[in-house]
Image (tube, helix red, strand yellow):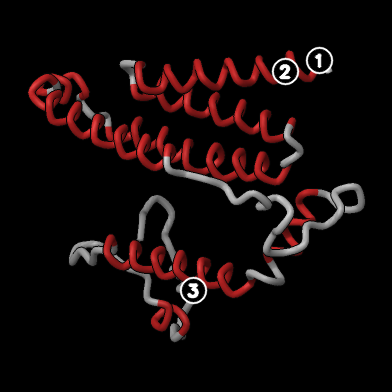
């Protein structure tokens, strides 16, 4: 129990410190690296809670894809953040007003939130015994049985979004040679032999 408490405070402290460094770091590359560190420690907290599937998804999806994508985009764009920060103070009142409005909305929602008295004892679907199956298997059974339609719909929406992004960014430039599969397949003469004299080219 003592070791469990030590690791909990260790992961929590590093996660909070990394989150603060994400928003306070002047270098955007350092911010992304601190974000990756925060994700890893949050995954450690999920493992301690017994949710190893959420920990795996956090590392694979957010660290392996999103955070790395952010890092490469920031490094490749080479944005002049010094120039962007010059007009920061003129937008501070508007940003502060929006922050106060969002904080007020969160306080109103949280203060008026109430749980049903028997919400833990009345789940929508029966919860399997965690002693017999793992957390990942329980989520898989629920996801691929009762919620398979919503799962497939979400995948179809992501597929359409990916195709739309490819179509919108595809540009046909007139001077760029493009591959034509029909011309390649229809070629009759693949190899052409030339008799080259010594000391001369083709």
How far separated are the C-alphas under marks 1 and 2? 6 Å
Measure how far apart labels 3 and 1 are at the Cα level.
Answer: 71 Å
Q: Nearer the viewer, mark 3 or mark 1?
A: 1
Label disc, if present, on residue 3 of the rendered structure = 1
Q: Residue at x 81, y 15 (%)?
A: 3
Q: Which mark is residue 168?
A: none
Q: Nearer the viewer, residue 199 or 183?
A: 183
Q: Which residue matches tag 3? A: 191
How far apart are the alpha carbons under marks 2 and 3?
Answer: 67 Å
Q: Is residue 119 above or below residue 17?
A: below
Q: Position of residue 100 (x, y in %)?
A: 24, 30
According to the image, label 2 marks what residue? 7
What is the secondary structure assignment of the residue under circle 1? helix
Rendered view: 26 above or below 156: above
Within 10 Å of disc 3 (Cα), the crowding (few <14, some 14-19, many 20+) is few
Residue at the image point whose x is 78% and y is 49% from the top: 135
Relative to the observer, which residue lies in front, 185 or 126?
126
Specify the quadrant that holds the N terminus. top right
Q: Secondary structure at mark 3?
A: loop
Q: Looking at this rendering, what residue extends furthest in the front direction? A: 117
For the C terminus, the quadrant is bottom left
Q: How many marks can you see?
A: 3
Q: Counting residues from the N terminus, which is met first, the one under dot 2 or under dot 3? A: 2
For disc 2, the neighbor class at 10 Å (few under 14, some 14 to 19, many from 20) is: some
Residue 67: horizontal and vertical position, in percent?
Answer: 47, 36
- Image position of 161 with respect to 137: above or below: below
Tell me if mark 1 has few (under 14), some (14-19) or many (20+) residues whose alpha carbon lies within 10 angstroms of its own.
Answer: few
CB of mark 1 within 8 Å of CB of mark 2? yes
Q: Quadrant of residue 138?
A: bottom right
């Amino acid at each position: 129990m003592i070791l469990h408490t030590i690791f909990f405070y260790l992961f929590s402290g590093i996660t909070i410190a990394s989150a603060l460094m994400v928003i306070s770091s002047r270098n955007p590359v350092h911010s992304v690296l601190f974000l990756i560190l925060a994700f890893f420690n949050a995954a450690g907290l999920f493992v301690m809670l017994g949710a190893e599937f959420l920990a795996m998804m956090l590392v694979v999806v957010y660290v392996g894809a999103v955070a790395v994508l952010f890092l490469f985009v920031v490094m490749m764009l080479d944005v002049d953040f010094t120039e962007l920060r010059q007009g920061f103070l003129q937008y501070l009142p508007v940003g502060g007003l929006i922050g106060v409005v969002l904080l007020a909305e969160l306080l109103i929602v949280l203060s008026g939130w109430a749980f049903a008295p028997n919400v833990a004892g009345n789940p929508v679907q029966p919860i399997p015994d965690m002693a017999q199956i793992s957390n990942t298997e329980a989520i898989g059974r629920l996801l691929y049985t009762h919620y398979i339609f919503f799962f497939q719909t979400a995948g179809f929406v992501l597929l359409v979004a990916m195709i739309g992004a490819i179509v919108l960014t595809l540009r046909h430039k007139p001077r760029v040679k493009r591959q034509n599969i029909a011309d390649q397949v229809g070629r009759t003469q693949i190899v052409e032999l030339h008799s080259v004299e010594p000391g001369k080219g083709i």
